[in-house]
Amino acid sequence: MNILKNFSVAAASFALALATASCGGSRSGSDAGMDAFVDDLLGKMTLEEKLGQLNLPASDDIVTGQAKSSNIGQMVADGKVGGVFNIKGVEKIRDLQRVAVEESRLGIPLIFGMDVVHGYETVFPIPLGLSCSWDMQSVEKSARIAAREASSAGICWTFSPMVDICRDPRWGRASEGSGEDPFLGAAIARAMVKGYQGDNLRNNDEIMACVKHFALYGAPEGGRDYNTVDMSRQRMFNEYFAPYKAGAEAGAGSFMTSFNTVDGIPATANRWLLTDVLRGMWGWDGFVVTDYTAISEMIAHGLGDLQQVSALALKAGTDMDMVADGFNGTLAQSLEEGKVDLGQIDAAVRRILEAKYKLGLFDDPYKYIDSGRGEKEIYSAANREEARRIAAETFVLLKNDNDILPLRKKGRIALIGPLANSAANMPGTWSVAANFERYKSLYDAFRDAVGSEAEVVYAKGSNLEADPQLEADATMFGRDMRDPRSEKELLAEALRVAAGADVIVAALGESSEYSGESSSRTILTLPEIQRRLLEALLATGKPVVMLNFSGRPTVMTWESEHVPAILNVWFGGSEAGDAIADVVFGKVSPSGKLTMTMPRSVGQIPVYYNHFNTGRPKADDSRFEKFRTGYLDSPNAPLYPFGYGLSYTTFEYSGFALSADEMTADGAITASVTVTNTGRYDGDEIVQLYIRDMVGSSARPVKELKGFERISLRAGESRKVEFEITPELLKFYNYELEFVAEPGEFLAMVGPDSDRLSVLPFTLK
Ligand code: BGC
């Protein structure tokens, strides 16, 4: 019996409805065809088959997290699986889909998910790096290319974008998000969803997005992964929720719950969060999947046994259970005992079936399976070219004394450091589909860049860490780069290599897995063994350029005093080597700006730009002031502020003006500023607008990003940049959580970063 055939007929007859339906999560377009189709299918399903749709086991193929599943094939045939994730390879996916379609009783197709977080085989910079481009076209393009590659390998669902706001660089997953700002984070969330889902999932190169991790995952106490999150609702709504909401409004088809508690209740069982806020207030109607074993983890959270926590999750609004086997394993019993009702189960099943319908899988379960496409699409020259261009936009030039950078292609260049010759550490964390063998190390890229014009010599210089265990923990998943030689031997070799060089480029910092999941740190300075290497290189008296590889803001207070040039390169993806060479040798002028504040010390954390004032602000941050807010041993100001980043050229801001100094509740004013490239190089500048609400019914931040524009200026060129300020932009969630613009005085501020700003007042009537 091939029931699928009936589905295809049914689905085809609703094709018109599908074509006019909105995809993903926004409730704007109702879809009678889809409703009728899903009603009909639900009516045919047994309870066991329904629970099967809610089940998302891991494949044995790529191991993530702790749990592992087996016998997937048999479970699929038995109708006990709704989707599978992190399988790489279109043939494997085809086989499993065939089992679902041909061997299960109802032939319901599977959805295939994957953590395509910053690219598939063409890997883009880690999301934190990508955010430093402030380039929404590039962000969207990266997601579009990722979708094209992943879909050509059978993937129709990505666990991305990760939009958790983070103010704590101790947290390793800062690398996966877009930094500390809700306004920028929301813009990036929209661009990513658009990039993945394209034209409403109509085409077979458009895949369903999953906004994660809902919610507040980026604010764990102590920066320790999975730890408690506790914050006021006003803070949630004003400072953390915007990117999730933007993802929902952009029509993301799915959301993933976070591991942490929200207001004392784990997100996965938090009905207020998943139902009242996400579905109620925001009107979103996609499906909610848990994070990896998040349901069973609620046993350790102390919420009950597996049966209890599974029922709580369902009732809260969770639809799909990733790996915990709580829904499949216990909901039948809970139904029998009256702890959940069939309506709740049906609602969850409906949302999963709707997602499959929106993806077009009932029309063609093999829509995403086309072996020919992958060969042309995956890691294509065109995709790599884009990844290289985009990576070069993400590097942040922190310091460049005496214009050491860009380097001229002449003489002898010594490239030294543990990251200098490690292709596997270029893509960064969460590059699940990466193919390290295809990537270039920095050393190879430098040699390709200089050709016969200069000589590049290399030495490793030091291991990543003195402690081999710590290094092993920070270089797992095939990123191992340990050198068996002693510190002394490595250093001696480096000094020999450096001796004959004209300039030294030190490739230092973190390895890929020093950030990412479960990679929290308490020390954010350069590992001591690398610091000793750096000191020795500086002691040669030769000019030294430091390339800082990092998945988070690191503490570079010492380096900022002693090293003449520092370029923060994050993890730039598969094409990082070439992209870094492009910037180091001046083919591209650096233009990235920080999206997370760089602290002076771990003790300052959390340190972020959009903070409240205290009642006792300091008058002068350069010294200690008794009974004023501050530290005995440190200024309050960070080392490098949010929005900061240099270029090889210089930009001057002039003529900042507002079109009016009063604004009515239905009016708007325009802020304008002229930016001039006053240096010798062409370059890109990221112009930023901040606003301060001077008096509010609640305390208001000292400034909030409310606009930005990335512009390209040739040397000597000027451009007038305009920002429209509307009352909408002035709104915030008051104590009652009403979204309001309160009349009164505001400040508009523009400049190159969150610190160097010109200020003008205006009034909202
Ligand atoms: C992570 C998620 C990821 C999931 C599936 C979890 O451990 O927290 O971000 O999507 O695994 O791989």
Image: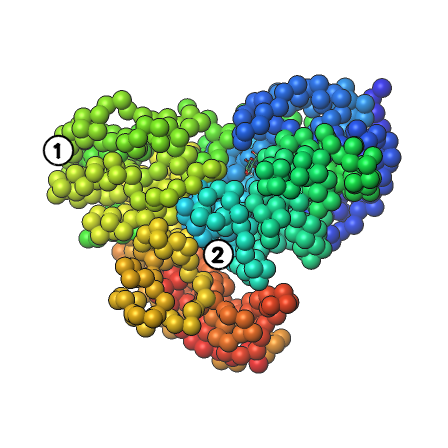
* Mark 2 closeness class: few <14, some 14–19, many ≥20 residues within 10 Å: many
Q: Is residue 259 left or right of residue 544?
A: right
Determine which of the numbered discs, if any, sits on residue 500 in the image: 1
Secondary structure under badge 2?
Answer: loop
What residue is shown at x 48% (from left), y 42% (from top)?
A: 225
Amino acid type for the residue under numbered disc 2:
Asp
Residue ID for mark 2? 181
Residue 1, placed above or below residue 531: above
Indicate the quadrant of ligand 1 in the picture.
top right
Q: Quadrant of the N terminus?
A: top right
| Closer to the camera in the image, 201 or 227 | 227
Q: Quadrant of residue 491?
A: top left
Q: Position of residue 681 (x, y in %)?
A: 29, 53
Q: Position of residue 265 (x, y in %)?
A: 62, 48
| Closer to the camera in the image, 686 or 542 | 542
What residue is shown at x 23% (from left), y 31% (from top)?
A: 461
Q: Is residue 556 left or right of residue 294?
A: left
Amino acid type for the residue under numbered disc 1:
Gly
Q: Is mark 2 within 8 Å of ligand 1?
A: no
Q: Position of residue 671 (x, y in %)?
A: 47, 71
* Mark 1 closeness class: few <14, some 14–19, many ≥20 residues within 10 Å: few
Q: Position of residue 384 (x, y in %)?
A: 45, 35
Residue 150, placed above or below residue 136: above
What residue is shown at x 68% (from left), y 53% (from top)?
A: 272
Alpha carbons under labels 1 and 2: distance apart: 45 Å
Secondary structure under badge 1?
Answer: loop
Q: Is residue 642 left or right of residue 162?
A: left
| Closer to the camera in the image, 573 or 44 | 44
| Closer to the camera in the image, 375 or 146 | 146
Q: Quadrant of the C terminus?
A: bottom right
Q: Can residue 445 be seen in the rendering of this structure?
A: no
Counting residues from the N terminus, which is met first, the one under dot 1 or under dot 2?
A: 2
